Image (tube, helix red, strand yellow):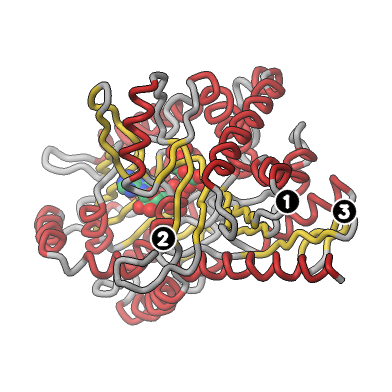
Amino acid sequence: CERPDGRPFRQRLLVVANRLPVSAVRRGEDSWSLEISAGGLVTALLGVKEFEARWIGWAGVNVPDEIGQKALTRALAEKRCIPVFLDEEIVHQYYNGYCNNILWPLFHYLGLPQEDRLATTRSFQSQFAAYKKANQMFADVVNTHYEEGDVVWCHDYHLMYLPECLKKHNTKMKVGWFLHTPFPSSEIHRTLPSRSELLRSVLAADLVGFHTYDYARHFVSACTRILGLEGTPEGVEDQGRLTRVAAFPIGIDSDRFIRALELPQVQEHIKELKERFAGRKVMLGVDRLDMIKGIPQKILAFEKFLEENSTWRDKVVLLQIAVPTRTDVPEYQKLTSQVHEIVGRINGRFGTLTAVPIHHLDRSLDFHALCALYAVTDVALVTSLRDGMNLVSYEFVACQDAKKGVLILSEFAGAAQSLGAGAILVNPWNITEVAASIGQALDMQAEEREKRHRHNFHHVTTHTAQEWAETFVSELNDTVVEAQLRTSK
Ligand code: ADP
Ligand code: G6P
């Protein structure tokens, strides 16, 4: 098996994630079109090129009929993707319910949804049962496609029960699990009724990875405090068996962004944007429309900045591009209307007949449009209330080698640990502080911008998605060999 450039692939990799890199849209009884899925997990994994990777996951659509399933399986095979078909009820209970209404907010320190806390607590058991059932469905597909020597890499909070399902079936399988969100303090994890089962299942993996050292430490503490196991510098030990736990900070395929800026269509786009916003500084937010991204807080901080700096009012514009996500979950529906309400109020307050201060788009931009937008931006605003890493901040930096714009970055994003020295770090809950940082960023002198950018650009171009995957997989291979040596002694 060869890569497109003729070199052999290193190894076969089964990447298992809830979301496939493409989402399917039905066009007819047996015809499908495929669109790239949004999100950091997909962005990072698309940058992994050295392995012969097969993706196993959900195509984001309910396909109840056999004709549709067969046609979609064929269409996905061309992209080296293998579907897991989840019916509506499972999606409701497992994906909307347990994953996105319980684990996601909890892992981001947002607690359970405010209004229906009691209802969520009541439906907990049935949703957890659906979660386990869904994880077993993923395991069944992995088992069907697994070949000896494959590495199986499970991803994210949707699939915490998967390592156990896989190892029960085949103890020899090399299984790694990586979390793309924060792992919270053990005090938070303790509140989950299924706290022990989830930890034990993750520990069935050979290697467990997190974005930062802090998240890894929280996980090990949860295992010691909740399960009473021994935490060591290498990981967690249970009756002589070690599960290796470590930090593997993710990155992006920075070359892909840098190369895209040279393309004529991107250059054309850049020219149009420069003309469109001539005479105004451009501030940019690019996020999934998710409560963890702190979008209302960001917009309120921008309002405060305009309120306090009247001379900037007609000289700056905020472009907030927010792709809708998880739209069947009530919390997300509420967020959309909240953001619309705030944007409308501020544009009414500070807009003129010819210009508004905030352009808010509820949609996904294609890759080239996104690169152009990053390139013309003066100040990027990443104000996540919590974020595993945040790759938007990396993408912005990769596209800024000409302009050397400023990154305002939440101290609660994992990226604060890697890009903190080049960014202006803020507490996104403190609107006054974020407003002041906007002023500082807009006024920053070229020399300081250059210095900050250099630091971040170096990081983003040297800590890539490819490097991240290679490090994880080679550590997984080593971990398995070491474990075999230990047991044969
Ligand atoms: P998360 O994984 O929580 O969505 P990240 O910042 O790590 O956060 O990754 C988001 C990914 O999704 C990035 O690659 C970004 O380019 C993409 N993305 C987010 N919002 C949009 C949008 N409105 N249009 C296009 N791509 C988007
Ligand atoms: C985050 C999660 C991913 C998820 C992505 C998009 O990045 O870590 O696992 O795929 O958000 O969310 P969605 O629910 O649309 O898959």
Q: Nearer the viewer, mark 2 or mark 1?
A: 1
Q: Considering depth in this image, is 381 or 333 the residue closer to the camera?
A: 333
Q: Is residue 293 left or right of residue 158?
A: left
Disc 2/disc 1 C-alpha distance (Å): 39 Å
Tag 2 near tag 1, CB within 8 Å: no
Q: Quadrant of the C terminus?
A: bottom right
Residue 22 at x, y percent in the picture? 35, 43
Residue 355 at x, y percent in the picture? 16, 43
Q: Is residue 270 above or below residue 330?
A: below
Q: Which mark is residue 457?
A: none
Q: Is residue 345 above or below residue 6?
A: above
| The image quarter in which residue 370 lies | bottom left
Disc 2/disc 3 C-alpha distance (Å): 37 Å
Q: Nearer the viewer, mark 3 or mark 1?
A: 1
Amino acid type indicated by mark 3: Leu
Which residue is identified by label 2?
A: 393
Residue 443 at x, y percent in the picture? 32, 68
Q: What residue is drawn where x is 28% and y is 60%?
A: 374
Q: Nearer the viewer, mark 2 or mark 3?
A: 3
Amino acid type indicated by mark 2: Ser
Residue 7 at x, y percent in the picture? 36, 74
Chain-order first, disc 2 or disc 1: 1
Q: Considering depth in this image, is 334 or 91 the residue closer to the camera?
A: 91
Which residue is identified by label 3?
A: 229
Q: Considering depth in this image, is 182 or 46 the residue closer to the camera?
A: 46
Dot 2 beta carbon under 8 Å from ligand 1: yes
